[in-house]
Image (spheres, rainbow, N blue to C red):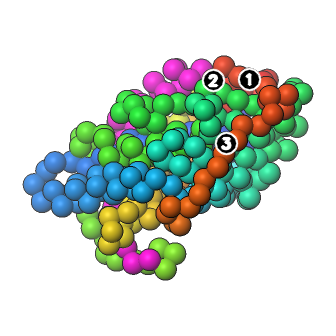
């Protein structure tokens, strides 16, 4: 399964998986300690810490992925909206647009519950509308970003904790309002070598047997308000996926907005008889279930 695959899972689902895989690499972010970048380093790391300390927020995540190659030409955008409790690692995100529309992710009690959208359900052999997989730890500095498991706090923890070497450059772009709130925008050039190395390790440790995307360029932008809170986080990457003799170019953008800080968050697990337990993320992404 993957871009260019001829399995019965479908092109849209394969493209959606590529988008989620790249989303998971959001966590590989930090700012170098080179002279002249100290202020940016402090602003970005502090934003991660301050936003985590805010406790809760509403979240909107947008994943856009486009491909070009002999095996697949397509472009999709997926939107998930919900809320997250950063302290207790609770989250509930419902997909409202794209191939995942109708799907939902709930993170509660160390488990990620996924309500599969119609596109995926049509190609799975499951008797329940939900599946569960163990949630990837959001506190480990060597386990970047867990957007596929629905925990936005993971990306914030990485901003706060990762070493500085994962970024090759940074600059303050200017000022911009995000959802009506004035912010300062920073742009970071990411260490693609580290991201590609992590991608290989991540797939192996999570049972994912699809072709690994090779990232060629990657940058990240963050928007920080006057209180030091992160209001928007966006990563853009280009690369390719090779399947056999076919190579497909992939461009992905993952954006997360944080707003309504302090909002009440209540997340409950689906009824047990509505859930099929799966071993890991690879089992979820496998077309055979």
Q: Where is residue 18 in the image (x, y as percent from the top left)?
A: 61, 41
Q: In the picture shown, does residue 155 fall above or below 261? A: above
Residue under label 2: 280
Tell me the residue at 65%/58% (across/down). Answer: 81
Which of the 4 image quarters holds residue 40? bottom left
Please state which of residues 208 and 151 is positioned toward the viewer in this rendering: 151
**Earlier-in-chain disc, 2 versus 3:** 3
Name the mark nearer the viewer: 2 or 3: 3
Query: Residue 26 vs residue 58: left or right?
Result: left
Residue under label 1: 277
Q: Is mark 1 on a helix, strand or loop?
A: strand
Q: In the picture shown, does residue 89 fall above or below 52? A: above
Tell me the residue at 84%/32% (across/down). Answer: 274
Whether label 1 touches label 2, CB < 8 Å: no
Which of the 4 image quarters holds residue 272? top right
Query: Residue 32 vs residue 25: left or right?
Result: left
Residue under label 3: 106
> Is 206 a magenta residue?
yes
């Amino acid at each position: 399964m993957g871009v260019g695959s001829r399995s019965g899972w479908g092109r849209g689902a394969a493209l959606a998986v590529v988008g989620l895989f790249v989303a998971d690499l959001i966590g590989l972010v930090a700012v170098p300690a080179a002279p002249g970048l100290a202020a940016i380093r402090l602003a970005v790391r502090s934003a991660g810490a301050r936003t985590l300390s805010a406790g809760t927020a509403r979240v909107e995540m947008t994943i856009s992925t486009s491909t070009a190659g002999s095996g697949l030409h397509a472009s999709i955008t997926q939107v998930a909206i919900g809320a997250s409790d950063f302290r207790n690692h609770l989250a509930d995100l419902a997909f409202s647009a794209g191939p995942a529309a109708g799907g939902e992710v709930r993170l509660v009690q160390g488990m990620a519950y996924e309500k599969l959208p119609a596109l995926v359900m049509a190609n799975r052999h499951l008797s329940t509308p939900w599946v569960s997989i163990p949630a990837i730890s959001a506190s480990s500095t060597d386990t970047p970003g867990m957007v596929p498991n629905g925990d936005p706090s993971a990306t914030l923890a990485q901003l706060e904790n990762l070493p500085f070497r994962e970024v090759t450059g940074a600059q303050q772009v200017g000022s911009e309002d995000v959802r009506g709130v004035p912010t300062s925008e920073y742009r970071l050039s990411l260490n693609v070598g580290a991201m590609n190395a992590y991608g290989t390790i991540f797939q192996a440790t999570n049972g994912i047997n699809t072709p690994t995307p090779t990232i060629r360029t990657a940058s990240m932008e963050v928007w920080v308000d006057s209180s030091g809170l992160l209001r928007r986080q966006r990563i853009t990457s280009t690369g390719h996926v090779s399947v056999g003799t076919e190579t497909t170019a992939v461009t992905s953008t993952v954006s997360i907005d944080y707003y309504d800080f302090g909002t009440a968050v209540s997340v409950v697990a689906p009824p047990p008889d509505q859930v099929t337990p799966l071993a890991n993320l690879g089992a979820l992404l496998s077309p055979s279930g």
